[in-house]
Image: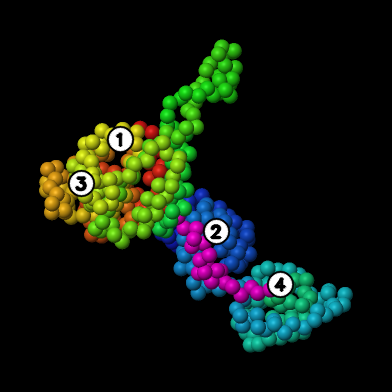
Amino acid sequence: MFIDFFYLLRNYGVPVSITEWMTLMEALGKGLAASSLMSFYHLARTVLVKSEAHFDRYDLAFASYFTGVETPIELTEKVLKWLENALPPRFISPEERKQFQKWDLDELRRQLEERLRTQKGEHHGGGNWIGTGGTSRFGHSGYNPAGVRLGGQSVNKSAVKVAAERHFRGFRTDETIGVRQFEVALRKLRQLSTKVDGPKEELDIDETIKETGEKGGLLQLVWSRGRKNMVKVALIMDSGGSMVPYLRICSQLFTAINRSTHFKDLRFFFFHNCVYQHIYLDPSCQVRNSIKTEDFLRLLGPEYKVIFLGDASMAPSELLMVDGAIDWYYSNPEPGIVWLKRIADHFNHSVWLNPIPAAYWNRTFGSYTINLIREVFPMYELTVEGLEGAIKKLMVRK
């Protein structure tokens, strides 16, 4: 049932598993959607979507799949118009009560569908049509123990309209991010660092007592890492040229990292298109304000977490050829790819953040060099998800 909807959700990036889908089928089999598309919308979202970050993708898939689908419970504005001029509730005698039908959901659904097809206008005080103040099974302000209350508070918003409004667009984590999201992601780097970095130099009282007890009273000292943050970070940013369209987001990342006070050491460096025998100390990328890349590797030990930020897009000659540097006054006796590999080999942890959406890495200008650099550095898209993936990669122990 709805198997195409399952695949559509996956295509829209909602990570739905087979187990979750079978749970939804079980819920539908038990009637938890109440034959209502709106109920199905909420039920399916509850069962299938594990994070609010995927709510917007779910809405997009839902609106795409169910556009044009209506159910009797989601009444149109025309039907609600029939119920606006309500009659006051009327008293039903005991004799009249005996005449009402027993509750039968299938029969009730069939009758409502028939009324919606055949009724031409509003009706009040009757016992058959959708109306008010009577004994009809459909309407309000009347009486029928085997009926359904329709009207009163507005119910004219369909599930498709609700999904199309996209109330959860701001929950997306694959959208371009700002300073605050950068700061939150970078804080995870700090928190994880206390667990995996630095020497074990503090006595862990609880673990010492536990281990000593397990050894029958023979003292077993257990040491743990302190809460000092040992993380050292180097941000190396591409400046100018094809990076101009991404100045704003690069500035946001620079601001977020610069605000960070929870790193033991933080360094900023710059390059233009590719790193050669010099690495620059400011975005102007002038040799007079640079250091030799060899000195850069001597100054920064392998423990630094290195984050490259750039679109990795350039002419293949800039990456692969001697004297391929784009600046006419600058010659490089070794290809840029050689220097990138040296940097990757020197540091224990390094990643590359690319502001170009990942969907375009194989079909944009520079796709050739992008894929070559991806073989040297783990590359991530510059989004919340991409940044979180990069942070996790930086924390993997070698």
The amino acid sitting under disc 3 is Arg
Residue 40 magenta-highlighted: no
- Percent of width and height locating residue 279: 24, 44
Label pair 2/1, CB-CB below 8 angstroms: no
- Percent of width and height locating residue 170: 49, 60
- How far apart are the two marked residues, 1 and 4, measured between alpha carbons? 73 Å
Drawn side of residue 134 relative to residue 332, left or right: right
Pick whichever of labels 2 and 3 is earlier in the sequence: 2
User: Is label 4 or label 3 in front?
Assistant: 3
User: Is label 3 or label 1 in front?
Assistant: 3
User: Is label 2 or label 4 in front?
Assistant: 2
- How far apart are the two marked residues, 2 and 4, measured between alpha carbons? 26 Å
The amino acid sitting under disc 4 is Val
Pick whichever of labels 2 and 4 is earlier in the sequence: 2
For residue 94, which quarter of the picture? bottom right
Q: Residue at x 78, y 78 (%)?
A: 142
The amino acid sitting under disc 2 is Arg
Q: Which residue is mark 1?
A: 300
Which stretch did the figure color magenta?
153-174
Query: Could you classify mark 2 by the number of other residues whose Cα lies within 10 Å: few (under 14), some (14-19), or many (20 or more)?
Result: some
Pick whichever of labels 2 and 1 is earlier in the sequence: 2
Q: Which residue is mark 4?
A: 148
Query: Could you classify mark 4 by the number of other residues whose Cα lies within 10 Å: few (under 14), some (14-19), or many (20 or more)?
Result: some
The amino acid sitting under disc 1 is Leu
Query: Could you classify mark 3 by the number of other residues whose Cα lies within 10 Å: few (under 14), some (14-19), or many (20 or more)?
Result: few
In the image, residue 212 sits, relative to residue 370, either above or below, namely above
Element carrying mark 1: loop
Element carrying mark 4: strand
